[in-house]
Amino acid sequence: MFNLEVSDPANLLFSKEESLRILDQLITIRKFEEKSIELYKSGLMGGSLHGYIGQEGVAVGVCSQLNKDDYLTVTYRSRGQAIAKGASMEKLFAEMMGKVDGYCKGKGGPMHITDLEIGFLGANGIVGAGIPIATGAAFTAKKKGTSQVSVTFFGDGATNQGVFHEALNLASIWKLPVVFVCENNLYSEMSPIADMVPNEHLAERALAYHIPAVIVDGNDVEAVSKVTQEAVERARNNGGPTFIEAKTYRQQGHMFGDAETYRTKEEVNEWKKKDPILLFTNKLIELGLVTDEIVEQLSHEIELKVEKAYQFALNSEQPNYDEIFTDVF
Amino acid sequence: MTRQITYAEAINEALDEILREDESVFLLGEDIGHYGGVFKVTKGLYDKFGGERVIDTPISESGFIGLGIGAAMTGLKPIIEIMWVDFTLVAIDQILNQAAKFSYMSGGQTKVPLVIRTQGGGGRGNGAQHSQSLEGLFAQFPGIKVVCPSTPYDVKGLLKSSVAENGPVIFIEHKMLYNTKGEVPEEDYSIPLGKADIKRKGSDVTIVSLSRMVQFSLDAAKELEKEGIDAEIIDLRSLAPLDTETVIESVKKTNRLVVVHEAHTTFGWGAEIVSQVQQDAFDYLDGPIIRVGAEDVPIPYNLELEKEVLPQVKDIVKAVKEALYIEVK
């Protein structure tokens, strides 16, 4: 029923310049996520840390096809997509630390990152809840006749939520310009998704709603970008929604500190060989676009940027107590 | 110029005027279009404004409330009809975890100007899942306004103000009020949210209520008048915002208080009024504050049993006498 979409190993999808920008974004998200672990361990943030390491190819691939004013809703595993959409690392770190310069003045936290200036309508702490909301943003785009597209990222587990099905049905009957991006990282929180659905591919579920669906190697950033391009084109040309199932892998636990008793180290290591950054870097090296030294240099520069953003957040003030009572209504 | 119209007609007029005045407004709900709604509140609006603005939805409350939230945060103004307030419980995540919290969680970036119109209460044998009074539940959640009008005049003026809000409002009509008539001016007007209305001036006892219980309280006041008891009737009109000031002022004058609601007595919102009054007007009270509410059982289907479970005029009369230490025969 489905063919796994992958990129052409002999050719680049993007120009050299674009490819380097893609690589930059992938590494930026990885470095940000690694720094986030340090942040969490240092006790400077509350709650839980839901890492994105291993899934960067999906966020970068999808967002490579979006405009600044296209809408996005995401899950609590959200900083990767935010960075790919153009969010500021300074404000992300500051929000994670609960500081006043954070995206939500320290009142939302990592699960509720919002940046309306880049169409980032909000991360969400409730599994699946952002799906109908993105569908509503698509409704606005269609009603106003703009060519904006609305994209919603969610995990495999979310496809068992009622609102997932309700939103797909609404998007289909009203032909809304929305792209449903299911990041299938194989685990529904701490349980294998295979135990939780009868379907081999979650994309099958979209077919029940007459929504065109594809499956793609989520660790292949170019393949993700290509299928997104088709989906976005369909949406902008009044062709309605598309469902993308990106097969990927969460290299870390559901949240930092997760005992990960539900999988083996061998499995994790196997997937690390298919790491999206490793795959794309190797391709660029093989095709002669970059060298190890260039990648190393780039990584170093990114580390400095991430460190600078982190320092900004560290130096940001705590919100004033007056903030407790603002923005309620 | 004023004329007598029904509560349902007053809502219909308000919707008609709002749709005419504001292009960004649209109606969304089950069977509200061609059919005109199960209580015929949206009758004729589909013919007048078309299916683009008066939109029938699938039976999918979470989905289309979520869609409404997404539309509201991106520049539209949805007015959603939920056929029965009981059905809001199906979509409670979208209403309370999403709509009510977005402004705060996003540090004030996201606004959700969404009105959810619905109807509640008992009185016509609709049974346990179609007769509830849930206003107190919503009022417990910061971030959403809760409006419960009692007259044709109020319902029109309050709906106008609710739609003008820049945040979510749950607007709970009462099924037994739809056919009641009252004076409504032909001229444009609105009633600010959070201002209680003294429906009858009196000096011996204050009766606080809203929605259908206002008329019951007025009927009780007539009976009490025959026995020389002069009751002041306060219609709160909304629970959030709550106009405690008007209640306190009245109690300072009458020194007696009875709170009447159709919601279940235990943990009902009446307890909140009692608490605030005893705290702010303790020295003015000359007797115990009495609560009148539904019995703590699901609403029974049998009309006689239902009547016994829900507050009636005689229950209010009895409660007032208790508050005045008059022996009840």
Image: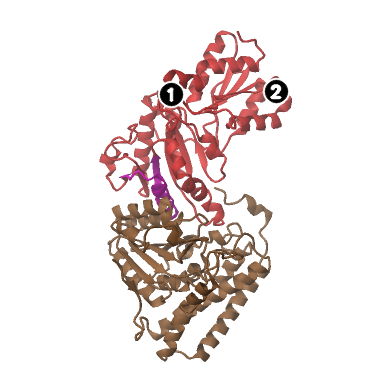
Chain colours: A brown, B red
Distance CA(mark 1)–CA(mark 2)? 33 Å
Residue B58 found in image quarter: top left
The answer to which of A55 and B32 lies nearer the viewer is: A55
- Identify the residue at image location x=46%, y=20%: B305
Mark 2 lies on residue: B285
Which label was assigned to residue B40? none
Chain of the residue where label 2 is placed in the rendered structure: B
Whether B77 is among the magenta residues is yes
Chain of the residue where label 1 is placed in the rendered structure: B
Whether B47 is among the magenta residues is no
x then y, percent, for residue A97? 64, 64
Q: Is residue B8 left or right of residue B251?
A: left
x then y, percent, for residue A174? 30, 53
- Mark 2 lies on a secondary structure that is loop
Mark 1 lies on residue: B123
The answer to which of A167 and B165 lies nearer the viewer is: A167
Marks 1 and 2 close (CB-CB < 8 Å): no
x then y, percent, for residue A140? 37, 55
- Identify the residue at image location x=71%, y=20%: B286
Give the magenta part as a residue range.
B55-81
Task: Say if labels 1 and 2 share a chain.
Answer: yes
Q: Residue furthest right?
A: B283
Taking B23 as reference, is B316 above or below it?
Answer: above
* Residue type of the residue flagged with mark 1: Gly
x then y, percent, for residue A274? 46, 78
For the question of whether residue B192 can be seen, the reply is: no
The answer to which of B252 and A130 lies nearer the viewer is: A130
Taking A54 as reference, is B315 above or below it?
Answer: above
